[in-house]
Image (spheres, rainbow, N blue to C red):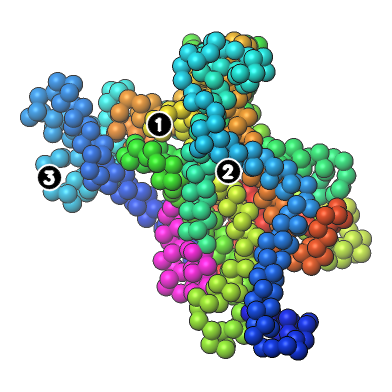
């Protein structure tokens, strides 16, 4: 990489002054090159896709809400801070209306955004991280290591996720968002690891991997340099799916009142609305709908980004680098990756 | 045949491992259920000297025996289908679960089959008329459906169809007072009660199934063997079923195994919302009542159900795709 940048810079501008300035140039070039390759091009390609664009906008709203909460720009939720069951979009001091006990719903939603985002991130990183580690090692190394890893993940696949999480939640009472995210995806890695393994199995037979092996390149280097880049699109898509699973599972379990909680959050709000009469009258409908929109919106944003993410990794699209124009709308969508579970 | 034998032998091994896990959770965790059970019994006014005997009766574990003895006792109990006695319901755990299992399986199987069939059909049509208005609309809705968890559908249906319009019941699996038999009245009542749970559990999965099928379908349609089949003059229906559908669905079938696991776990939330008396419902009520024998029993049975379901699916996969029975060809 570095040598490539060096040679291109020296051929581009043949420097007649001195050696030292050429070194300076090349460092800046290298930075520029890095910016272009790793920041600008992916961003341009991602932005050129409508789905990613909408997804990024949606996710930004959530980041903004988290920021508002961290900086304390909106009031904290507390009972009887306003009229009871105020409908949404009536009183602009309480844009989303209030609950039966007079809590500002917008404050409730904003209040738990940092918690939820942190938990979702932790769940996604943990589940995909372990899956990639397990999948690549067992797929690439094979032999006894493979047998052991496969048996262990088979065992974890045989345990239904949510019931296990419920049992663990009772045992550990996780209230820290990062810990909770990890508990929720406690056995999510197993299935993902298996499918990554089967992809690695075919990659390890590719000619360039074999060439690297013949040249005596170390295993970890081959995995990092040759195998990982190939499964990266699949991993990114599945990162998003794991994140989605974390949201769904956490809100679901908060909703039925199994996870311990100290404050309010989307699932708890939904649970309160559901249990305290929100189901019976139309006046309380917004109380149910506001947390629902918050949940669905976040999941929708994540999925849109993952759908468009495919393009960032698709070299055919990237080399064309149409950037701003819409003409990238080629058949980049036949991803056979199973975006399923 | 070796493959089937190995596959079959793995079932008792997995069940053993899961039973060990539940035993570990009951017995070994500091401050875990076992300790809490003891505290609870003392608080209920059971004399201290009788607590051990009560725990033994409830959980099949002799608290004063050495650990290995407790473990063996527990395993023997599990093997004899004796999972202890439920504290809150005052019935043998196995009896409670035996009543609950059919309902859960009914929900999961019906909704998974419906989801798969509908999703595959929509995805196939999308792939065939790729880029059409229908394709774009369906893709958009599929992405949206993927963003909505099934329990949201459940809550919304419950709100509008059950509570506001009174079209569907809001709980239970059958009407009270209807005798369990194969009478029209009974079956109708069962279907009426299961309609909303099944509907919400099905809709949630259609989106991703359709998107997946669409991707596979487009890929298969571009393969050379489909072209060759056309040139050979095979009938359209034959090409569609034997060539395209089969090769597009097969890769999804493996994913189905994983999906069954997630869906079985998902009934916990679903059954709770609809007060549907399946395994998940009892799991949650056991959790809320601190009824550890029932809780661990539910967990164990849900896991065993999953193990058996995946096993059945694995075997049928071998029947559908002969390549798989050649042993795990990827085994190196």
Q: Residues within 10 Å of mark 1 (few under 14, many from 20)?
A: some
The quarter of the rendered structure image containing the N terminus of chain A is bottom right
Disc 3: which residue: B65
Secondary structure found at label 1: loop
Q: For the residues tagged 3 and 1, is the chain the same?
A: no
Q: Is residue B185 or residue A85 the one in the foreground?
A: A85
Left or right of A23 in this view: A260? left
The chain holding disc 1 is A
Q: Are marks 3 and 1 in contact (CB under 8 Å)?
A: no
The chain holding disc 3 is B
Residue A245, x across and y down, in percent: 55, 43
Q: For the residues tagged 3 and 2, is the chain the same?
A: no
Q: Which residues are magenta?
A: A133-158
- Report the disc number at residue A261: 1
Residue A95, x across and y down, in percent: 63, 21
- Residue drawn at x 58%, y 74% as measured from the top left: A225
Q: Residues within 10 Å of mark 3 (few under 14, many from 20)?
A: few
- Residue drawn at x 57%, y 62% as measured from the top left: A196
Q: Which SS does the magenta portion mostly show?
A: helix
Count of numbered badges drawn on the protein: 3
| Residue mark closest to the camera, 3 vs 2 | 2
Q: Residues within 10 Å of mark 2 (few under 14, many from 20)?
A: many
Disc 2: which residue: A244
Q: Residue furthest left?
A: B49
The chain holding disc 2 is A
């Amino acid at each position: 990489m570095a040598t490539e940048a060096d040679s291109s810079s020296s051929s581009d501008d043949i420097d007649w002054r001195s050696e030292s300035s050429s070194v300076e140039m090349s460092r800046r070039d290298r930075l520029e090159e890095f910016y272009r390759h790793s920041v600008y091009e992916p961003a341009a390609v991602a932005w050129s896709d409508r789905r990613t664009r909408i997804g990024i906008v949606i996710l930004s709203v959530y980041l903004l809400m988290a920021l508002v909460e961290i900086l304390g720009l909106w009031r904290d939720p507390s009972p009887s801070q306003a009229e009871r069951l105020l409908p949404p979009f009536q009183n602009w001091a309480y844009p989303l209306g209030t609950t039966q006990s007079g809590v500002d719903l917008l404050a409730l939603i904003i209040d738990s955004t940092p918690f939820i985002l942190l938990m979702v991130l932790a769940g996604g990183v943990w589940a995909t991280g372990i899956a990639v580690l397990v999948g690549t090692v067992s797929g690439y190394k094979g032999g006894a290591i493979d047998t052991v890893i496969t048996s262990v993940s088979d065992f974890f696949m045989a345990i239904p996720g949510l019931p296990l999480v419920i049992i663990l939640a009772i045992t550990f009472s996780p209230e820290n968002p990062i810990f909770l995210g990890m508990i929720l995806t406690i056995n999510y890695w197993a299935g993902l690891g298996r499918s990554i393994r089967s992809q690695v199995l075919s990659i390890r037979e590719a000619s360039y991997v074999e060439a690297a092996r013949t040249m005596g390149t170390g295993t970890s280097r081959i995995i990092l340099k040759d195998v990982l880049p190939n499964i990266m699109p699949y991993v990114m898509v599945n990162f998003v799916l794991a994140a989605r699973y974390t949201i769904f599972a956490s809100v679901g379990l908060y909703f039925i009142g199994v996870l311990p909680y100290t404050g309010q959050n989307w699932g708890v709000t939904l649970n309160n609305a559901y249990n305290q009469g929100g189901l019976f009258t139309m006046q309380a409908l917004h109380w149910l709908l506001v947390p629902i929109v918050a949940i669905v919106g976040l999941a929708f944003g994540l999925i849109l980004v993952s759908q468009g993410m495919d393009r960032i990794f698709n070299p055919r699209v990237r080399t064309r680098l149409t950037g701003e124009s819409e003409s990238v709308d080629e058949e980049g969508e036949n991803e056979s990756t199973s975006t399923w579970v | 045949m070796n493959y089937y034998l190995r596959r079959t032998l793995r079932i008792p091994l997995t069940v053993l491992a899961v039973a060990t896990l539940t035993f570990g959770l009951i017995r070994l965790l500091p401050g875990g259920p076992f300790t809490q059970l003891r505290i609870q019994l003392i608080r209920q006014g059971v004399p201290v000297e009788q607590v051990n005997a009560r725990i033994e009766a409830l959980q099949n574990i002799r608290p004063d025996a050495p650990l290995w003895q407790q473990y063996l006792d527990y395993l023997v109990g599990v093997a004899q289908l004796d999972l202890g006695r439920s504290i809150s319901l005052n019935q043998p755990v196995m009896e409670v679960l035996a009543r609950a299992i059919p309902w859960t399986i009914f929900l999961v199987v019906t909704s998974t089959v419906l989801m798969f069939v509908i999703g595959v059909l929509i995805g196939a049509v999308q792939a065939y008329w790729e880029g059409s208005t229908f394709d774009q609309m369906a893709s958009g809705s599929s992405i949206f459906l993927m963003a909505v968890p099934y329990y949201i559908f459940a809550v919304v249906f419950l709100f509008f169809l059950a509570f506001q319009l009174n079209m569907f019941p809001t709980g239970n699996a059958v009407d009270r007072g209807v005798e369990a038999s194969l009478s029209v009245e009974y079956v109708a009542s069962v279907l009426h009660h299961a309609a909303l749970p099944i509907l919400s559990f099905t809709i949630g999965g259609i989106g991703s199934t359709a998107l997946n099928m669409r991707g596979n379908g487009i890929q298969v349609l571009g393969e050379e063997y489909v072209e060759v089949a056309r040139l050979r003059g095979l009938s359209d229906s034959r090409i569609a079923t034997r060539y395209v559908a089969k090769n597009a669905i097969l890769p999804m079938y493996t994913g189905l195994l994983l999906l069954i696991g997630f869906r079985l776990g998902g009934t916990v939330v679903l059954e709770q919302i609809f007060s549907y008396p399946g395994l998940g419902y009892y799991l949650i009520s056991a959790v809320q009542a601190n009824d550890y024998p029932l809780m661990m029993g539910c967990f164990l049975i849900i896991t065993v159900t999953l193990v058996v379901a995946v096993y059945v699916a694995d075997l049928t996969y071998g029947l559908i795709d002969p390549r798989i029975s050649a042993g795990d060809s990827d085994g190196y």
